[in-house]
Amino acid sequence: MSLLKKSVLLAAPILVADQALKVWIKTHMALNESISLIGNKAFIHFTENAGMAFGIELFGSTGKLLLTLLRIVFIGVLVWFTWKQIRRKAPVGLVLGLSAMCAGAVGNLIDCLFYGVIFSASTYTQVAQLFPEGGGYELFGFGWVVDMFYFPVIQTTYPSWFPFNAGERFIFFRPIFNLADAAITCSVFYLLIFQRSLFLREEKK
């Protein structure tokens, strides 16, 4: 099987699954609604992210537009670099890691570009509609990324003797993320961990 086919067979299911789950969440759950998966340790918890990772927002609408443009540029460079590795027959592990990263990045970009146009706003009491009559909740390129995986595995409080946040609540893992985020994070760690062996193999070739 060619490198290109392997790349597509990994990236396509990630992208399809990411978007299918997000559409289901938007059309079946109200904002901040939760579904328990494993007791109080794992949830599907619907939230939306208007900014970058961990909900960081910069410079209002201007920052959002700049972020979307930067995402497009980054994805363009990433796809070009991945295609270049496929053409030069780079190690399979390198190509697959880059392919998963591409799929995750494209998945979140789709939210930013189209979700504001094709969905009505999600609220704490109302589920969003797909292709609403009155139009979407935002302009093209200003959509919010849908997040849903929440794993508060450790829930406790800081001890009274702790030098900071004494007595306050501590949760690990606090961030809420989506399948695209997971694909990006896993591929980055994979490439960082195995990059030496991947490039050593390339040098031997």
Image (cartoon, grey):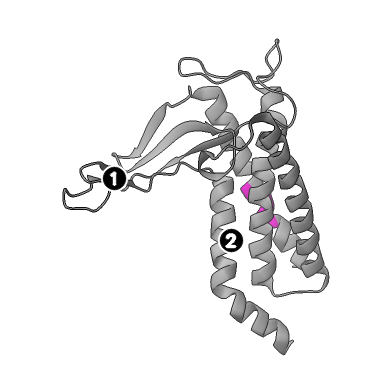
Residue 75 falls within the magenta-colored stretch: no
> Up-down: is 11 above or below 192?
above
Residue 33 place in picture, x, y as percent: 42, 26
- Identify the residue at horizontal 61%, vertical 18% (top origin): 129
Asked if residue 56 lies left or right of residue 67, the reply is: left
Residue 152 place in picture, x, y as percent: 34, 44
Residue 13 falls within the magenta-colored stretch: yes
The kind of residue tagged 2 is: Ser
- Identify the residue at horizontal 64%, vertical 42% (top origin): 108
Judge the density around disc 1: few (<14), some (14-19), many (≥20) Cα neighbours within 10 Å: some
- The N terminus - image quarter: bottom right
Location of mark 1 (residue)? 170
Helix, strand or loop for the magenta stretch, by majority: helix
- Picture quadrant of residue 38: top left
Q: Looking at the image, is mark 1 or mark 2 earlier in the sequence? A: 1
- Identify the residue at horizontal 32%, vertical 45% (top origin): 171
Instruction: Identify the element where label 2 is drawn.
Output: helix
- Identify the residue at horizontal 27%, vertical 45% (top origin): 165
Q: Which stretch did the figure color magenta?
A: 9-14
Q: Which residue ends up furthest to the bottom in the rendered image?
A: 204
The kind of residue tagged 1 is: Phe
- The C terminus - image quarter: bottom right
In three-dimensional space, the C-alpha distance between marks 1 and 2, rounded to whole angstroms, equals 28 Å
Judge the density around disc 2: few (<14), some (14-19), many (≥20) Cα neighbours within 10 Å: many
- Picture quadrant of residue 120: top right
Q: Which residue ends up furthest to the front in the rendered image?
A: 163
Location of mark 2 (residue)? 187
Residue 48 place in picture, x, y as percent: 54, 32
Q: Nearer the viewer, residue 21 or 67?
A: 67
Q: Nearer the viewer, residue 86 or 141?
A: 141
* Residue 2 visible in the displayed image: no
